[in-house]
Image: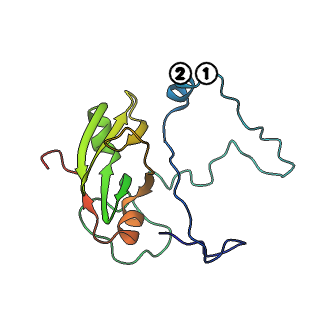
Amino acid sequence: MEKSIAGPLAGKNLKKITSIRTSWKSWTERNPQTTVLSTDTGYERNYSRDPYEGYYRSLGIWFPVGDVRKDLSPKEMVLGIEMGREARAYPLSKLKEEPGLLRDKLGEETIQIEVAPDGGILRVTDNHGEEIPSIFAYWFAWQAFHPETTVYREED
């Protein structure tokens, strides 16, 4: 269980919530009534500029991260899933190769990852169809927090 390290909930257990990462096109096709938060926040900030522009494409890491396992490139993006005491990293590059429904066994559970035609992740569910939390992260970060993680391979 993750714990808060700062703020009013410092030291308290945190509940994981489900999320997805998808394109705007895919999102609005599934959720046509979506509204967008205004960028008129009262703060002087250019919300159209990505402060990490260039970082995504560069091979380097901007800060020290310690040892990184060699299973994947340090900045390979992964979908990280935990089930019980098991953790697995699903490289997004592999998931994008074959959109549709990927089934995998993680620990004692069968999980399903629904991948959109554009490579976005639409849903991650357990064998009962209940959505389960997942995390999008660079490989270097995922493996740092999950040193015993496995990496999904199609032949597994």
**Tag 1 residue:** 32
Q: Residues within 10 Å of mark 1 (few under 14, many from 20)?
A: few
Q: Which residue is mark 2?
A: 29
Counting from the top left corner in percent of width and height, residue 105 is at 22, 49
Q: Which percent across, then down, holds residue 57?
A: 44, 51
Mark 2 Cα shell of 10 Å, populated few (<14), some (14-19), many (≥20):
few
What residue is at 39 percent from the left and 63 percent from the top?
142
Q: Nearest the camera: 135 or 8? A: 8
Q: Position of residue 76 (x, y in %)?
A: 35, 54
Identity of the residue drawn at 44% across and 43% down: 131
Identified at 53% across, 52% down, the residue is: 17
Q: Position of residue 2 (x, y in %)?
A: 50, 69
Q: Are marks 1 and 2 in contact (CB under 8 Å)?
A: yes
Q: Residue furthest right?
A: 42
Q: Where is residue 32, by image quadrant?
A: top right
- Residue projecting furthest to the front: 128
Amino acid carrying mark 1 in the image: Pro
Could you say which quadrant of the image residue 14 lies in? bottom right
Q: Nearer the viewer, residue 99 or 129?
A: 129
Inspect the image, locate mark 2, and give the three-letter code of the amino acid beneath it: Glu
Relative depth, front residue between 2 and 93: 2
